[in-house]
Structure formats: C-alpha cells, structure tokens
Amino acid sequence: MNSTIPKQQNKKMTEPDTTAVRTALWRALHAQVDAKPHILEDEIGLQLIAPPDDWQQRPDMKFTKRLRASVIARARFIEDLIIEQSSHGISQYVILGAGLDTFALRRPDIASKLHVYEVDQPGTLAWKQQRLIELEFSVPKYLHFVPVSFETSSWWEQLLKAGFDIRKAAVIACTGVSLYLTKEAITSTLHQIAALATGSKLAMTFYLPIEHLDEEDKPMQEIAEKGARAAGTPFMSFFTTDEILTLAREAGFKEAKTISTKDMDYFTNRTDDLLPASGEVFLLATT
C-alpha cells in the first residue's frame, strides 16, 4: 500500500515538521499552565525540541487553548486504549505518523510488555533518535523506528521488515493524519488494517466538515486551513460520522463506532475551563 502521510514529502527532512513540534509543545504546555489534575503528563517532547525560552508566547500556543485540549484528550484516549488492550493480551502497538510521540519512553511499565512501532518519515525519526542520544535517553529494545518515504514506498512493507507479526493482534493509532490524505488513501489504509489479525483495534482521528463545528471553533479552523495551504500541506479530507462509519464497514471491520474528543470524560469536574474543540473525532474499529 502506498498511502501518503504528508510530512514535507518533496524535500529531505532534517527535523520534525511544524505540526509534530506544535503537538509536542501543546502536550508540555498542558502540564505547565493548565490546572491539575493533568490529563496527560508529557514534557519529553519539549526536551527534544528545546525551543527558545519564550516558546509559550508563540501565537500557536497562546491562542489555541481548545485545540490544545483536543490534542491532550486524543493522546490520553490512545494511552488508555493501549493500556486496556495490553491487559487483554495484545502485544503490538503501531503509531502511524508518530511524530514526537513519547509513550514508549514515558510509560515503560506498559510499553515494555509490547512491541511499539513508530512509523514516520526517515528525517523525522533520524532527528528524534539523534536528540534522544544527545539527551542521554535510553532507547528501549521494544521501541522500533520504522522510517518510510511515504511517497515512494509502502509503510506496510516496512512495518513487516521491522518485525511486525501479522499473526498477532495489534493496536493501530493514527491521529492528526487523515486530514491531509485523500479519501482514496484513507480507504486503502482502512482496508489494509481491517485485514489484520482478529481482535486488532484501530483508533484513527478524522475531522468534521466546518459546518458541523461549534461556532466558536469555525474561525480557528479557517485560519488553520489557510495556513496549511500556505505551507504546502492543504487539508484534503473531511467526513461526517456516518461517512467514516460507512468507510469502515465497507473496509471489512467487524465493529466500528465514533467518539468525539469533546465528549470524553477527561474534562468533567475540572477547576478551569479547559474544553476541547469540536472538530476532531475518533473512529474506533475492531477487526
């Protein structure tokens, strides 16, 4: 399969793209400025990036509280899912478009029971590995980096070469990616994952059409779309929940449902007004 995950594909990457950096900084910002209890504790990405001291004053940090909440919720949701599935015996965890994910480093109590496969562009993973070395992090044996030039090679073939066992069930996470893919690429990816061993789980985020967003989120979405076009990575695919469920069923998943980050329980009884934006929704599907 040759579906593409857009990470500045027309030039060799020597560092993570802006989306991966922003996501990691949002996770760190949550731990530093939002009220306790924190939904997620993750400042390793901040250590890897080592931004200027005034990084919290960046416009994409100061004025994006609801987007930050969505990113925190989706990261916590994925972690809760893999912890639950690990307790049921699943031993493989694949992160498509891993960026600066740090689960394998932060949660060795869970990750050490798994084979964790981080799939992303060669430049992103090479940069990450180099930074881990420079910061004297120990890269565990259960963490497998799977570099893929998405425009020229198959992530599936590279995953198999990295040791992925097709006979065993797995959790596949894919967050913040589908927005940049064509419907055809998403459909192809769903068919590939639906063919995994029985009991495998897919947790993939998708994005609602702008008319389905809360009014307060529409201006930020318009700004984000304009910025993505200017960066050469335009938004390509939006789905209603009915549309994504139809694609999942047609791909062959036995079960499929959706859940919005907005509807997750992580934001109840908080002392601050941290609430996620309305546009991002999870497809949770089982083979």
Image (cartoon, grey):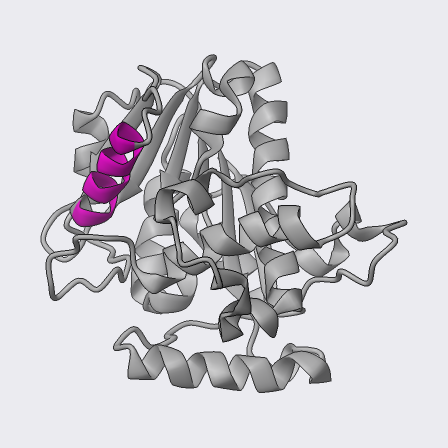
Q: Position of residue 236 (x, y in %)?
A: 37, 75
Residue at position x 61%, y 50% in the image:
72
Residue at position x 37%, y 49% in the image:
49
On the question of residue 283 being in view, the answer is: no
In the image, residue 230 above or below residue 182:
below
Residue 79 appears left or right of 151? right
Let me know if residue 217 is in the magenta part: no
In the image, residue 97 above or below residue 138:
below
Q: Quadrant of residue 12?
A: bottom left
Q: Position of residue 175 (x, y in %)?
A: 47, 52
Residue at position x 36%, y 58% in the image:
186
Q: Residue furthest front?
A: 53
In the image, residue 170 above or below residue 44:
above
In the image, residue 162 above or below residue 53:
above
Which is nearer the eye, 209 or 267?
267
Question: What residue range appears in magenta?
Answer: 123-134
Q: Position of residue 4 (x, y in %)?
A: 24, 58
Residue 274 appears left or right of 184? right
